[in-house]
Amino acid sequence: MSQAGMIFLLAVGGGGGALCRYLLGLAVMKKFPTPRIPVAMIIVNIIGSFGLGSLYGTINDNDALFALLGFGFFGAFTTFSTFSVEAVQLVMDKKYQNALVYLSLSICGSIMGFLLGYYII
């Protein structure tokens, strides 16, 4: 596939992933309107890590599909930048215990999600 084609797949996947992250975040925030920790981002990042692990475990040499779903969709669906902002905000608000729980659940949950996706699928 051409480089332009790969860039197109990356953009389409990224747009879809960002939209899904936003919509799932809204749904989770409606369910948990005043959480002590950013539950929506934890859920998004664990689901995204599971999906990426599943994809990584099943796609071997399909660069186009990995560009669309791996780099594009799951790259935009999960977000390290939002995770970082929310973690720093908890620390700045002196909610140290909440920050520790958020950091632990986010990091360990995302790694475990990836491994589960990789080995289950």
Image (cartoon, rainbow, N blue to C red):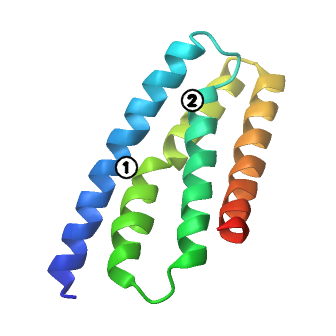
In the figure, 114 relative to 83: above or below? below
- Decide: few, some or many residues near mark 1? Use Cα within 10 Å; few <14, some 14-19, many ≥20: many
Q: Amino acid at mark 2?
A: Ala
Q: Amino acid at mark 1?
A: Gly
Using the image, tell me which numbered label, if any, was put on residue 17.
1
Q: Secondary structure at mark 2?
A: helix
The percent coordinates of residue 41 (x first, y second) are: 57, 35
Q: Quadrant of the C terminus?
A: bottom right
Q: Are marks 2 and 1 in contact (CB under 8 Å)?
A: no
Q: Nearer the viewer, residue 25 or 79?
A: 25
- Decide: few, some or many residues near mark 2? Use Cα within 10 Å; few <14, some 14-19, many ≥20: many
In the figure, 65 relative to 90: above or below? below
Q: Secondary structure at mark 1?
A: helix
The percent coordinates of residue 75 (x first, y second) are: 44, 58
The percent coordinates of residue 30 (x first, y second) are: 50, 14
Q: Which residue is painted at 50% across and 45% down in the image?
A: 81
Q: Which residue is identified by label 2?
A: 40
Query: Along the horizontal axis of the image, is 4 left or right of 22?
Result: left
Q: Which residue is painted at 68% across and 52% down in the image?
A: 110
Q: Which residue is painted at 24% across and 59% down in the image?
A: 12
Q: Which residue is painted at 59% across and 47% down in the image?
A: 47
Query: Along the horizontal axis of the image, is 93 left or right of 5?
Result: right
In the figure, 17 relative to 34: above or below? below
The percent coordinates of residue 42 (x first, y second) are: 63, 37
Give the image quarter of residue 11. bottom left
Give the image quarter of residue 50. bottom right
Q: Quadrant of the N terminus?
A: bottom left
In the figure, 40 relative to 71: above or below? above
Query: Along the horizontal axis of the image, is 64 left or right of 102?
Result: left
Query: Along the horizontal axis of the image, is 107 left or right of 100?
Result: left
Q: Nearer the viewer, residue 34 or 47?
A: 47
